[in-house]
Image (cartoon, helix red, strand yellow):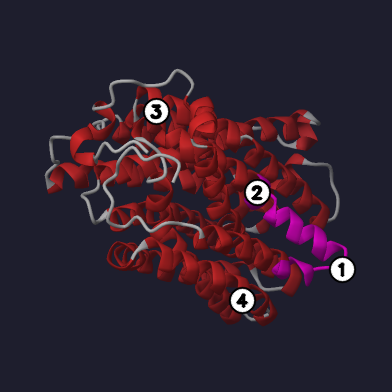
Amino acid sequence: MNTDTLAADAPRVLAGRERLRPLLAGSVGNAMEWFDWATFVTFAALLGPQFYPAGDSATNVLQTLSVFAVGFLFRPLGGALIGAYCDRHGRSPALRLSLLLMAAGSLLIALAPPYRTAGALAPALLVVARALQGLSAGGEGAAMSTYVNEIAPAGRRGLYSSAVYVSTTLGSLAATLLALLLHDTLTPAQLGGWGWRVPFALGALLALYGWYLRGRMRETSVFEAVRERPRNPARQVLRSHPWAAVRVAGFTLGATVVYYTFASYLPLYAQLQYGIGANAALKAAVVAQVVFMAALPLFGAAADRFGRRPLLLVFGIGSACLAPVLFGLLSGSAVRLGVVMTAALLLFGCYAGAAPSATLEMFPTALRSSGIGLPYALTVAVFGGTAPYLIEYLSAHGHAGWYPWYVAALCLISTVSFLRYRETKDVDLASVGDR
């Protein structure tokens, strides 16, 4: 194990305002990035008829969700490439690059011609746009988590890293609120004709503004203190820290399925399976996301106070036990939908408050972004990105009851990873070996 400490890496201690300014800039950019990402699934029901041949609504939604999953397939590549860029050239440049890619993807969707005028070119452009967004999202999570943890004071990394999920949820919440506004103010014909383009055009503009803000972020002194930077960080991670990479995947497995099921797709699922109105489902999602976002700093502070491991175990065991119960509570009631989403997201909050710091502390500074970027993005791509498609596929074939047990099984696998995790709440953010 390498024993260099944070004090050795960063001899100059940042003042409070020096930490808060870049934290705010990074968080605003992260919120804008995830606004773009969440907009796709939020408007999936409208995108299907635009980019595919006329068919029944279920088929169009499945086709759109397959593109949603394709976007996830590019996340591992983004995690590897942007993670390597982050470890070689700096956290701030990598964060700006990820926003540029997300803005390009959103702008392409906003300007893409529909199937009725462009034929097969329309879905092809949609795939290209999602590929760009997938590359962006694959690098954003690791770069943002690394940056936030490296500027955080010792003993408060859980609290600071809660900003990652607070800003992610804020972006998703903004996408949901915009969907509500458009559904309330536009007719179905207007939404299908041009209204669906509005959130993607707005998302591109917001991402460019985030890019500008991130240009003013100073580099972390932890990164600047690194004298030797590997030419191929991803390869070095696999060579020197393979088990740490496996642990990152184990941590992520249950969490990504829980998040993309309950935070992202459940409102649309409730509309399709239980006939809940779009506005009612979206309002339930807003309430759940607001409660989740407000609770996140408390979970981060709890991780700093009591340790990462207890919170991780609460998430893993609680989600495994409650996933079938929560799905059983779903009905045609928007109130029940809100209760189910809130309960699941509060459980996920235990993970969100503890996991970013816990996983980063597994890797040395020179490999930190690559160390979490590739295994995290790969796991999210395989399990998180396919979650909406899988639940719809099983429902269409009369096996909707299988899906909650699938979620529970993945959470149990993650729980095994949590049980093998060695507590790190009091360690310096140091170059650690394969622990």
CA gap between label 1 and label 2 equals 22 Å
In front of the other: 428 or 277: 428
129, above or below 404, in the image = above
Q: Is residue 87 visible?
A: yes
Badge 4 amino acid: Cys
Query: Which residue is drawn at the image coordinates 73% and 30% (left, top)?
Result: 124
The residue carrying mark 3 is 87
Looking at the image, do the residues carrying marks 4 and 1 touch, with CB atoms under 8 Å apart? Answer: no
Looking at the image, do the residues carrying marks 2 and 3 touch, with CB atoms under 8 Å apart? Answer: no
Q: How many marks?
A: 4
Pointer 2: residues within 10 angstroms few (<14), some, or many (20+)?
Answer: many
CA gap between label 3 and label 1 equals 47 Å
Q: Is residue 108 visible?
A: no
Picture quadrant of residue 74: top right
430, above or below 169, in the image = above
Q: Say whether residue 367 is magenta.
A: no
The mark that comes first in sequence, 2 or 3, is 3
The residue carrying mark 1 is 398
Image quarter of the N terminus: top left
The mark that comes first in sequence, 4 or 2, is 4
Looking at the image, do the residues carrying marks 3 and 1 touch, with CB atoms under 8 Å apart? Answer: no
Report the side of 344 relative to 276 (left or right).
Answer: left
Query: Which residue is drawn at the image coordinates 78% and 68% (left, top)?
Result: 402
Q: Give the residues drawn in magenta, as a range.
A: 382-405
x and y, in percent, of residue 172 in the image: 49, 55
The residue carrying mark 2 is 385
The mark that comes first in sequence, 4 or 1, is 4
Pointer 1: residues within 10 angstroms few (<14), some, or many (20+)?
Answer: few
Report the side of 236 relative to 163 (left or right).
Answer: right
The mark that comes first in sequence, 4 or 3, is 3
Badge 1 amino acid: Gly
